[in-house]
Each structure stands twice: as structure tokens, then as C-alpha cells.
Image (cartoon, rainbow, N blue to C red):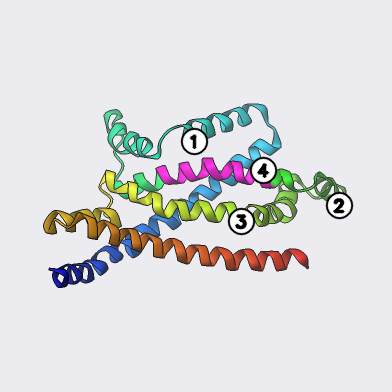
Amino acid sequence: MREGLLQLLADSFWKILLPGLTMTIPLTILSFAIGMVIAIVVAMIQVANIRVLKQLSRFYIWIIRGTPLLVQLYVVFYGLPNLGILINPFPAAVLVFSISIGAYDAETMRAAIESVSSGQMEAGYCVGMSYWQIMRRIILPQAFRTAFPSLSNSLIGLVKDTSLASNITVLEMLMATQRIIARTYEPLALYLEVGVIYLIFSTILTGLQAVGEKRLSKYGKR
């Protein structure tokens, strides 16, 4: 029986890993990239202190951070069709994850931007740079170095959160595992196996985070 279980785990490993490489990783990368664009825009709006836009940004952050990610997935995928808005599973997952990451990382970026000395903004104005030039060339690069650890943790968390996409029929690693369990009736072993695969992905990203932090620390000392 033990040999049969080991053979099952060996056979299922690639059947679980393949959706991880073709669905989980692309879903993570695409959602994080779009989410970072949202985060930077929302953070800059708050720092610029444009009253109406700032209030809208705070409302967006309040709603997204105050509601469960799974509920947001259900609203977009199962709820919006009642309004005639049909979104396929993968785009729906990207949309929800991007909006979620954008809300959380907007606060990270806002704090990082505000940590940069205001004197650098004034110095930029003195040499004739516009607000957007100062942000792009001076403020944001320093803010990214400050925010890098938190943003990296957010990316690692997103890898694990993509498992929720199985609830809206996205064929990622967890759903692939559930389909194998439905045929083999070995939930404990297979759920542990998919957990190990998520752990491998997270460990690789943690290692990349450590390398990135080391390089950024050297860059900051120059």
C-alpha cells in the first residue's frame, strides 16, 4: 500500500506542477504587475493630496482591505453576470487579484514615498524639474528600495492566494489536486503534496528576495 501511495504521489507531482507553471505563475505575475501599477497611481494620488481623488483612493483601499478576497472573487465571477457582465475565469481572477494587490501595496508605496526627504522634492523644483519628473527620477527609485521587502512579501502571499481561484473554476494547482483526489480518494497525501509545491515556489521567491535586498543595500551605499 505504501508503494502504491508513493507511486501516486510521483505520478501526480507533474500533474499538479504543470498547472502551477502554466496557470499559477502567469496568474501571479500578471496580477502583481497590474496591481503594482494601481498601487503606484493610488499612492501618488494620496501623496499629491488632491482632495477628491484622495478620498476616492481611501475609499477604494477601505473596501478592498475590509472584505475577503474570496468574496471579491465571487462578486466578480458569480455576481456580475446578474448585471449582464460576463468575465471568463482567468481574466476575472487577474482582475480581482490585481485590485486586491493594488489596495495593499498602495499603502506600502505611500509610506515609502513619504519616507523620502521632502527636501529632495524641493531640490528637484529648484533645478526646473516637473512634479512627475521628480517622482519618476528621484522619489520613486528610493521609495522602491524602501518598499522592496514588503512588496516581495506581497508577491509571495499572492502566489498562495491564487489557490482561491479554484473557486471560480480556474485550473490552477489546487483544482488540479482536487480532481486527482476525486479519482484516488487520497486527500491527505495529495493536499500535503500540493502544499509542498506551494512551499517550493515560496522558497524560491524568498531566496530571490534575499538576493534583491542584498543588491539594493549595496546600491544604496554607493
Secondary structure at badge 1 equals helix
Q: Is residue 16 above or below residue 182?
A: below
Of pointers 3 and 1, the one earlier in the residue sequence: 1
Secondary structure at badge 3 equals helix
Q: Amino acid at mark 4?
A: Ala
In the picture, the disc for residue 148 is 3
Residue 69 in sight from this viewpoint: yes
Marks 4 and 2, how far apart in space? 26 Å
For image coordinates 31% across by 42% down, the residue present is 87
Q: Is residue 177 above or below residue 89?
A: below
* Residue 164 placement, left or right of 111: left
Residue assigned mark 4: 111
Q: Which residues are magenta?
A: 96-112
In the picture, the disc for residue 65 is 1
- Label tally: 4
Residue assigned mark 2: 127
Q: Residues within 10 Å of mark 4 (few under 14, many from 20)?
A: some
Q: Residues within 10 Å of mark 2 (few under 14, many from 20)?
A: few
